């Protein structure tokens, strides 16, 4: 948490690692393709507009507010203490859920790759233990080394995937190149309903671009670097992901795309088919690298959020969360708290789903679904908050397009994405039960807000200390 230590490249690296574009290409692409069909690249272009409009809102706040509390402070300034607290609660729900999802994704990916290329049925929990120890140790020593390491991994995995996709497109894949993939039409497109369902997963591909907003305390020029990192990460990853999923559509073949669920490890399979066995292993390694980077970004994001909660001084116990290392100025109490939370969650996962990936991938799917919803709500609220914030507190800079039309457009887009979780396909068990549980947790946050509101000045004090 040392001030003025991070440059623009490191802030962009943090956001790009949070997105984990290679992870989306290798592991989320099949979920989008099953719904959107050959229009998967087009669906990702629509998702880019959703996220770039949200990035504009974050950039606006980032020009005026430098904080490690990101959305909590933004909404507090725009909509007041009550909505600020609820936004912070939603952030905590979403990021904690997705942090468990990311470690299970990394561990399951690693276990599958090792099992597929050896005679050993590798337990995913071994990989999970490794990444926990590794990232938490790096976090204790400081975020700078972690970001430099992540940047190296991002460059390496991007080179591998770009070489792979170019070879596929040059060879014409299974049935030749297919320009209609960049449109919403075609005999193998999922149509409007399929694109709508695929959009939910497409937004999930980009979630993580916003995490640079928590580096306001540590970047050398937060009012310049944070907006550039957030917008830049969306643009860079969008180009890379859209090109790569187009190549995957070509590789699978338009007539096969809607049945992609029947193909085990699609990226590894087509890499083996169109390049070679050894290159397929490189693609697997790129997948492991990307999921590791997502873990690094997610964990460091949570460390800063938990640290910020400790600064609220809501109680003597909660205040201990803001304790930092005297030697490294890192959030050691937040690291230990988060580590304890993850160990408990992984222990429960083992108890109910076992130590092998047949079970862990199930819980991964559940967590991906439920963890995205609170963050979509945060995006909607933040888009609304920027309008009164600039209008009332920065009137000299108010711009009709950037501070009214674009935020409303973004809020409507994310509302449509949220609606896509429930219509036209209504959630069935166990997803319906998971949504009920999520509603209960959000309800607890609302009740807690009303309770804290009775303590005169406490919500304002919390917001001031956290910010």
Image (cartoon, rainbow, N blue to C red):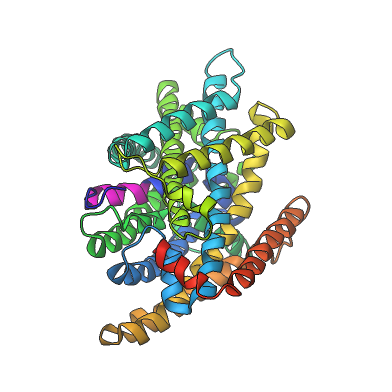
Q: Is residue 409 visible?
A: no
* Pick the front one: 3 or 64: 3
Figure quadrant of the C terminus: bottom left
Which corner quadrant of the image does residue 200 belong to? bottom right
Q: Main secondary structure of the magenta part?
A: helix
Q: Position of residue 423 (x, y in %)?
A: 69, 66
Q: Residue farthest to the top?
A: 119
In which quadrant of the rendered view does residue 388 lie? bottom left
State the image coordinates of residue 243 (x, y, percent, origin top left).
Answer: 38, 50
Membership of 412 in magenta stretch = no
Q: Is residue 14 magenta?
A: yes
Q: Residue at x 40, y 31 (%)?
A: 137
Q: Position of residue 29 (x, y in %)?
A: 52, 47
- In the visual, does 214 lie left or right of 377? left
Judged left or right of residue 113, residue 286 is left
Which of the pair 15/391 is nearer the observer? 391
Part of the protein shown in magenta: 8-16
Asked if residue 128 shows in the view, the reply is yes
């Amino acid at each position: 948490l040392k001030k003025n230590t991070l440059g623009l490249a490191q802030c962009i690296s943090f956001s790009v690692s949070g997105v984990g574009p290679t992870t989306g290409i290798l592991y989320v692409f099949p979920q989008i393709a099953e719904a959107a069909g050959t229009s998967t690249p087009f669906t990702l272009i629509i998702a880019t507009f959703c996220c770039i409009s949200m990035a504009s809102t974050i950039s606006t706040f980032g020009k005026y507010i430098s904080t490690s509390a990101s959305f909590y402070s933004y909404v507090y300034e725009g909509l007041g203490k009550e909505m600020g607290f609820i936004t912070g609660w939603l952030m905590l729900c979403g990021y904690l859920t997705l942090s468990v999802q990311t470690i299970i994704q990394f561990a399951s990916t690693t276990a599958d790759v090792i099992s597929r290329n050896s005679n050993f049925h590798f337990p995913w929990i071994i990989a999970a233990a490794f990444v926990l120890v590794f990232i938490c140790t790096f976090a204790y020593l400081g975020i700078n080394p972690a970001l430099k390491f992540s940047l190296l991994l991002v460059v390496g995995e991007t080179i591998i995937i770009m070489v792979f996709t170019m070879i596929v497109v040059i060879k014409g894949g299974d049935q030749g190149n297919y320009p209609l993939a960049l449109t919403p039409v075609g005999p193998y497109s999922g149509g409007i309903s399929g694109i709508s369902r695929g959009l939910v997963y497409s937004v999930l591909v980009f979630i993580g671009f916003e995490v640079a907003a928590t580096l306001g305390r540590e970047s050398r020029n937060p009012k310049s670097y944070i907006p550039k990192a957030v917008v830049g990460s969306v643009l860079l990853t969008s180009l890379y992901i859209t090109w790569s999923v187009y190549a995957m559509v070509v590789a699978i073949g338009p007539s096969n795309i809607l049945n992609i669920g029947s193909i085990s490890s699609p990226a590894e399979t087509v890499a083996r088919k169109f390049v070679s066995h050894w290159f397929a292993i490189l693609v697997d390694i790129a997948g492991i690298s990307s999921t590791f980077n997502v873990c690094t970004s997610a964990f460091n994001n949570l460390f800063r959020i938990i640290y910020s909660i400790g600064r609220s001084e809501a109680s003597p116990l909660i205040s201990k969360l803001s304790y930092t290392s005297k030697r490294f100025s890192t959030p050691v109490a937040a690291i230990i708290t988060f580590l304890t939370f993850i160990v408990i969650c992984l222990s429960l996962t083992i108890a109910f789903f076992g130590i092998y990936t047949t079970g862990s991938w199930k819980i991964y799917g559940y967590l991906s679904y439920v963890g995205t919803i609170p963050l979509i709500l945060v995006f909607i609220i933040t888009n609304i908050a920027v309008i009164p914030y600039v209008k009332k507190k920065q009137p000299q800079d108010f711009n009709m397009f950037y501070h009214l039309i674009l935020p409303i457009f973004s809020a409507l887009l994310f509302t449509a994405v949220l609606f896509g979780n429930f219509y036209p396909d209504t959630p069935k068990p166990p997803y319906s039960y998971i949504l009920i549980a999520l509603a209960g947790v959000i309800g607890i946050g609302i009740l807690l807000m009303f309770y804290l509101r009775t303590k005169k000045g406490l919500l304002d004090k919390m917001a001031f200390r956290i910010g």
